[in-house]
Image: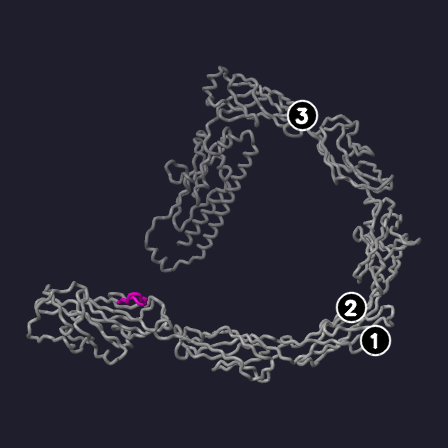
């Protein structure tokens, strides 16, 4: 153990040489000889606080590198204990290419992911004490690294960017707990290809004349890449586009017009060229990548005088009207210089076709009339106009020509007019029958239409306005004059019942004139009626209700049918027919349905009637409707008991039931409620109002209580039961019920309880018995199938011969099968089929059959008798499940075993199959 000694401040020359600190003492510091006593002690500085070093020290390796920073070693404290010195720890200096040491001049790529372990600080303590590492940064600088104090693992914690900071300065420290050495280190950030090229002087806009020579340089593009090496080199290219007229130098970025290409302002005044700057590529995060940037160069083409003028809006048409005067404007032509970027003025002139009657303004291009329209000799003139470009010094240069067609036209001053047989007419009327055939011409109309103008002014369109698609007019387009024909298109629209009159508007409207003159005439059609409709009921069926026992002639319902025809065609007569109509009659004019005078309706006999009614007009057209009549039940029957004196036997605890029947047809008239009017003794019975079940009061639970109530030995009580229906008015009837009170013979088991409950309903007991037999038969079939499958598998088994030989010498107890009989305490009693509560006398008088002697191998037991004698007691047979051999009970007075007799055939079959199984097992064993 190290003892605490006196602490002294010592110079760096007193620290023993180490692999990282093996330089000679610096000037101003003298190391003491080994024999010299230590210098006098000086007050030690506070522990763990570094003090100023005595002088700069340089490691020999670092002295060889001019760019490496000086190493400052801080010796904090030296302990002297037992004549030994406490030396400071030191870092290993493994050079900049190593990934462990003091981290000085270490290089790291800027694409190193955050969280990566990039270096291991490595050092030692001369005394072998545990050491810890530290890593700090100057105040205000980013802390890119973190170090694990124990392991010295240095981890990158911030993302690096060489373009922003290519060197990182840090302070690394190593301490043994008493002495701490701090070194200033520099870490280099190396480049990765992570920066794309950046274009300079954006945006790129170039103005060039359209007559520039092909191959000329027009612009230079510049882009810079901040990366180093190949990643910082830039080459240029253009994105391929159809009909591109430019090319670029890959190295210099000079944009030129392609050889053989020419710019044209009139075709494309502006070009948009996309230039691509691509670096030389380099590694980034372990992969080679090439980065690109794009920019758009806008090339504006400046117009040059190289295009002739041209007329706009050709062909030209002008018109002279009959009201025109000299000086009237006929038409104005327009021409433009083809060089729109720098256009010249235009000079207009007439070079042919004027005939001295037209003139043109040289500046505006307006053509005017110089004479009166009545003096014109032609109806059509072709005027040839010239447009010349005015150049420098008002010299006429390039030109263009156009033809103006001038037509002398009539003035549109007459509207269309409709004419009848006696001249102009605005209303036309005709009388006809309804529903003429489609396509028929309405010849009653004599209509003519005329427009007195000429040419286009006399062209107009005819249109019939009214009920849609009923009539159509021919022709639809007229020039000057035409005969108007009206044709039937939809015959269903010409219906007298919809209206005795049809009205239309006949329009004539000019087509190609600015005035759009028009004329209107009224078309009126007066319709005559025909018998074209069938009487129609207001409903396809009618539902009526009538009370039973209603007197004859009672009104049941009224049916209505409508015929929209006029006169006698619209008169409807009603008749009735069909099964069930004999009891009813109908009024032929009003449609009132009533019962026949002799009819008596009874809902209990028949409550539903249906028949047909017929509506017919004077010409025999008719329609049908169905009538449903329901006879409403009236409470006209009182409830009736089967017998006014009823004899019943009641077992204490079990109710008896009385029933009365009401012959009314419907509820609530046929719903019966029961009540007790009187009883002897009083307050001994209750009755269920709905079912009619009579039972004793709950306190009467035994015959002793009955005997206490009455002294009669036969215990026969009487009561009067009333049955009342729920009709209105309500009817009732009564019956006397004599009840013989008795006590049930004690029976056990669920079957006995069921038989007691169902004694008044033998069909219910018979159904339950059938269900039990069906279940037993099904269980037998399942068991038989399972045993058959098992026996089939046993017959296929072959026992090895050696096994048989080994078992022969061994004496075994003979396998004995005893047919069990009923014995108390015997485990097989659960398989007994006989009733535990059987008749003792019968059991005593019937000798019990002994089982056959037990079989001894290889002998088999004798087969059981095929039939049981009447006096023979049934044997208990083992079964697969005890549920198949349950104990029986008596069914009352009969004394017969209920379940034993029901399943005798089943027991016999089970016995035979069991014995067959024993025979097969004995054969297979021996």
Circle 2 is placed at which residue position? 329
Q: Is residue 427 above or below residue 158?
A: above
In the picture provided, is 866 more to the left or to the right than 533? left
Q: Nearer the viewer, residue 746 or 847?
A: 746
Binning the other alpha carbons within 10 Å of mark 3 as few (below 14), some (14 to 19) or many (20 upward) gives: many
Main SS of the magenta segment?
loop
- Mark 3 / mark 2, whichever is N-terminal: 2
The quarter of the displayed image where residue 577 is located: top right
Query: Is residue 753 part of the magenta span, yes or no?
Result: no
Q: Are marks 1 and 3 in contact (CB under 8 Å)?
A: no
Circle 1 is placed at which residue position? 355
Which residue: 28% across, 78% down? 67
Query: Is residue 143 part of the magenta span, yes or no?
Result: yes
Residue 80 location in percent, x, y? 10, 67
Residue 326 visible from this viewpoint: yes
> For numbered disc 2, what is the local secondary structure?
strand
Residue 752 location in percent, x, y? 48, 32
The quarter of the displayed image where residue 110 is located: bottom left
Binning the other alpha carbons within 10 Å of mark 2 as few (below 14), some (14 to 19) or many (20 upward) gives: some
Q: Is residue 411 above or below residue 440?
A: below
Circle 3 is placed at which residue position? 635
């Amino acid at each position: 153990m190290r003892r605490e000694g006196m602490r002294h401040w010592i110079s760096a020359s007193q620290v023993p040489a180490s692999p990282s600190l093996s330089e000679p003492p610096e000037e101003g510091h003298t190391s003491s000889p080994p024999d010299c006593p230590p210098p006098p002690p000086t007050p030690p500085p506070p522990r763990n606080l570094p003090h100023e070093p005595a002088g700069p020290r340089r490691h020999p390796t670092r002295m060889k590198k001019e760019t490496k920073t000086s190493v400052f070693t801080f010796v904090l404290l030296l302990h002297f204990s037992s004549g030994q010195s406490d030396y400071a720890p030191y870092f290993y200096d493994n050079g900049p290419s190593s990934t462990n040491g003091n981290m000085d001049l270490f290089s790291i790529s800027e694409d190193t992911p955050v969280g990566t372990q990039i270096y291991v600080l490595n050092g030692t303590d001369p005394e072998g004490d545990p050491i810890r590492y530290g890593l700090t940064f100057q105040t205000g600088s980013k802390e890119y690294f973190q170090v694990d104090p124990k392991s010295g693992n240095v981890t990158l914690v911030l993302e690096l960017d060489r373009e922003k900071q290519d060197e990182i300065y840090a302070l690394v420290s190593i301490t043994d707990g008493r002495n701490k050495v701090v070194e200033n280190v520099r870490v280099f950030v190396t480049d990765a290809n992570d920066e794309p090229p950046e274009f300079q002087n954006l945006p790129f806009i170039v103005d060039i004349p359209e007559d520039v020579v092909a191959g000329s340089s027009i612009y230079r593009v510049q882009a810079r890449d901040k990366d180093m090496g190949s990643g910082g080199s830039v080459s240029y290219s253009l994105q391929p586009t159809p009909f591109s007229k430019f090319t670029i130098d890959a190295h210099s970025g000079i944009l030129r017009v392609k050889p053989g290409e020419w710019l044209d302002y009139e075709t494309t005044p502006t070009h948009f060229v996309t230039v691509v700057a691509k670096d030389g590529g380099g590694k980034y995060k372990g992969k080679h990548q090439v980065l690109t940037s794009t920019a758009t160069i806008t090339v504006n083409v400046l117009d040059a005088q190289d295009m002739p003028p041209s007329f706009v809006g050709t062909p030209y048409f002008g018109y002279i009207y009959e009201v025109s005067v000299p000086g009237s404007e006929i038409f104005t032509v327009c021409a433009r210089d083809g060089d729109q970027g720098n256009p010249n003025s235009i000079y207009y002139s007439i070079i042919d076709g004027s005939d001295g009657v037209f003139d043109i303004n040289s500046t505006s291009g307006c053509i005017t009339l110089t004479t009166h329209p009545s003096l014109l000799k032609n109806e059509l003139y072709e005027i040839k106009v010239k447009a010349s470009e005015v150049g420098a010094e008002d010299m006429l240069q390039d030109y263009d020509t156009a033809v103006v067609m001038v037509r002398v036209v009539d003035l549109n001053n007459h509207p269309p007019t409709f004419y009848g047989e006696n001249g102009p007419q605005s209303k036309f009327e005709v009388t006809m029958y309804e529903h003429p055939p489609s396509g028929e011409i309405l010849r009653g109309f004599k209509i003519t239409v005329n427009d007195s103008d000429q040419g286009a002014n006399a062209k107009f369109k005819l249109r019939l306005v009214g009920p849609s698609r009923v009539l159509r007019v021919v022709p639809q387009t007229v020039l000057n004059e035409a005969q108007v024909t009206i044709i039937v298109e939809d015959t269903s629209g010409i219906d007298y019942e919809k209206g005795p009159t049809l009205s239309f508007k006949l329009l004539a409207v000019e087509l190609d004139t600015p005035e759009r003159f028009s004329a209107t005439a009224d078309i009126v059609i007066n319709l005559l009626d025909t018998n074209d409709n069938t009487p129609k009921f207001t409903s396809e069926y009618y539902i009526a209700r009538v009370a039973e026992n209603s007197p004859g002639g009672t009104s049941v319902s009224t049916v209505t049918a409508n015929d929209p025809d006029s006169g006698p065609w619209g008169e409807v007569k009603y008749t009735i027919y069909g099964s069930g109509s004999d009891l009813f009659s109908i009024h032929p004019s009003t449609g009132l349905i009533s019962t026949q005078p002799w009819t008596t309706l009874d809902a209990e006999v028949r409550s539903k009637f249906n028949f047909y009614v017929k509506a017919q007009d004077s010409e025999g057209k008719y329609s049908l409707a169905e009538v449903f009549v329901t006879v409403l039940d009236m409470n006209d029957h009182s409830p009736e008991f089967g017998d006014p004196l009823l004899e019943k036997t009641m077992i204490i605890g079990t109710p008896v039931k009385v029933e009365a029947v009401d012959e009314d047809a419907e509820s609530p008239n046929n719903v019966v409620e029961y009540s007790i009017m009187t009883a002897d003794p009083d307050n001994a019975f209750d009755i269920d109002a709905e079912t009619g079940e009579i039972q004793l009061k709950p306190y009467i639970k035994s015959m002793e209580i009955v005997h206490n109530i009455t002294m009669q030995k036969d215990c026969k009580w009487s009561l009067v039961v009333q049955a009342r229906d729920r009709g209105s008015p309500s009817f009732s009837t009564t019956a006397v019920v004599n009840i013989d009170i008795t006590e049930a013979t004690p029976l056990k088991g669920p079957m006995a309880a069921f038989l007691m409950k169902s004694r008044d309903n033998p069909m219910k007991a018979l159904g339950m018995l059938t269900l039990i037999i069906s279940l037993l038969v099904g269980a037998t079939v399942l068991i038989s199938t399972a045993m058959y499958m098992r026996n089939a598998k046993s017959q296929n088994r072959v026992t090895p011969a050696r096994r048989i030989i080994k078992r022969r010498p061994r004496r075994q107890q003979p396998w004995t099968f005893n047919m069990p009989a009923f014995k108390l305490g015997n485990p097989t009693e659960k398989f007994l089929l006989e009733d535990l509560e059987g008749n003792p006398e019968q059991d005593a008088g019937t000798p019990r059959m002994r089982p056959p002697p037990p079989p001894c191998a290889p002998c088999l037991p004798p087969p059981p008798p095929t039939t049981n004698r009447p006096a023979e007691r049934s044997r208990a047979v083992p079964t697969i499940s005890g549920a198949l051999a349950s104990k029986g009970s008596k069914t009352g007075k009969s004394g017969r075993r209920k379940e034993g007799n029901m399943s005798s055939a089943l027991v016999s079959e089970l016995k035979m199959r069991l014995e067959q199984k024993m025979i097969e097992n004995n054969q297979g064993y021996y």
